[in-house]
Amino acid sequence: MAPVPASAHRAPRALRIALPMALSLASAPAFAATAQAGLTGHWAGYAAIAIFALAYLFVVLEEFTHLRKSQPVMLAAGVIWALLAAVMAARGDLQAAHEAVRDYLLEYAELLLFLLAAMTYVNAMSERRVFDALRGWLLRRDFGYRALFWITGALSFALSPLLDNLTTALVMSAVLLAVGAANPRFVATGCINIVVAANAGGAFSPFGDITTLMVWQRGLVEFWTFFALFVPALVNWLVPAALMHFALPAGQPPSSDARVRMKRGAGPIMALFALTVALAVGFHGVLHVPPFLGMMTGLALLKLYGWWLQRTARHRERADFAREGSPGDVDAFDSYEQVARAEWDTLLFFFGVIMCVGALGFCGYLALSSQWFYGTLGATTANVLVGLMSAVLDNIPMMVAVLQMHPSMDTGQWLLVTLTAGVGGSLLSIGSAAGVALMGQARGQYTFFSHLKWSWAIALGYAAGIGTHLWLNARHFTG
């Protein structure tokens, strides 16, 4: 998943362009409509491509224009679909565009509600100082640089499947910056390790990355089947981590006695989050309904618990006032405030991307080129290329396009593209949301070129992870 803290969307987003991959894949929900539209040689089709490319140009220039990334793609989606609907109406087919838009809207609504619940829980745990307490605990342990390198990497790999790769990377980078500010070499190497570990950890869990979540919500891979990627993802992280270990400085950072106390209710909120994950899995696997229903049920439980925290806070305030003459600090909690703190720019960006890519599928461009990409090259080669391309392009629009194409692949291949799309972005610092965010967090210490220095080691891990999957999970390949 990709809940994005406010600090993340201010980070650079250079070169994260999805159009080339979008033009190579096809649309599933509206595939029948795509075949009937026949707009690949029409001026409206060319206009759709131009509008989408222009919108993504503004996304790339976000750092310089300060225009939120959701705004240009949302506008492009509206303009493109209005144009296509007018053309189809002129042809006498009034319903084709309407039905296609409705299909894509349903796909987006499921993703929106799922992510909204997940983001709210992460925000609630952050507000209750759960992550601050974890950071304080690590700082008090007096670990050496090399131990901290492995601990933060292992925690990133372990937490990412639940929290999401971006949130995990930001939490762990805060530890690195707190203990290694005086050692830029340690910070740079540690940030690379965190990015690779967080992306790898998010690849084997539907809750760890948006791309994995979308594959699971489509019902293409069962929840527990994703864990077949655990060992390949682990290899993907361990190979570059082992190579970077020898470049780490010796010694130990200055000790700290910082102690952070979690706020009242932090423990139950963590337990409710675990229950919410179980509900999402149960709703999808047992009841055969979309997993967002389980997430929204869990969100309702969080809100009820927030109501209880508020009521008891008022009672404690009155008791403190009667006893001491002042209300005291009882850590009241507002669940609606945590909903408001969700990264709406990211959520609306997904809307624009899904609708724009869907429009290209409706025109027929995606179906036109997908036959070559998956048909001629073959699924394995195509899926490996998806990961390599995600080192430069954003993996989320790419996976949206792959899913809308719905190529005929067995479970092993769907797992492969999930793995490559998830970890391929680690090859460059701009290839994943975690890398982009950490360049902003550790500005001047973790840079594009400091990451590029170790791209060869990350590429070895990428190849080793793919090889491990092809060997270890051969039973999932039917062809």
Image (spheres, rainbow, N blue to C red):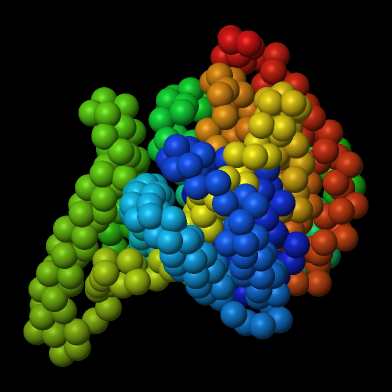
Residue lying farthest to the bottom in this orientation: 325
Q: Quadrant of residue 464?
A: top right
Pick whichever, 174 or 17, lies toward us: 17
Give above or below for 365 relative to 405. below
Pick whichever, 28 or 38, lies toward us: 38
Q: Is residue 72 visible?
A: yes
Give above or below for 460 relative to 58. above
Across and down, in percent, residue 147 comes to: 72, 45
The C terminus - image quarter: top right
From the viewer's perspective, tell me whether residue 248 is left or right of residue 333: right
Residue at x-position 34% and y-position 67%: 338
Residue at x-position 76% and y-position 27%: 377
Across and down, in percent, residue 417 comes to: 63, 33
Pick whichever, 382 or 296, lies toward us: 382
Pick whichever, 426 or 182, lies toward us: 426
Give above or below for 420 relative to 321. above
Residue at x-position 44% and y-position 43%: 33
Residue at x-position 26% and y-position 50%: 296
From the viewer's perspective, tell me whether residue 466 is left or right of residue 35: right
For the image, the number of numbered tags is 0
Q: Is residue 201 visible?
A: no
Across and down, in percent, residue 132 comes to: 50, 63
From the viewer's perspective, tell me whether residue 152 is left or right of residue 190: left
Q: Quadrant of residue 98?
A: bottom left
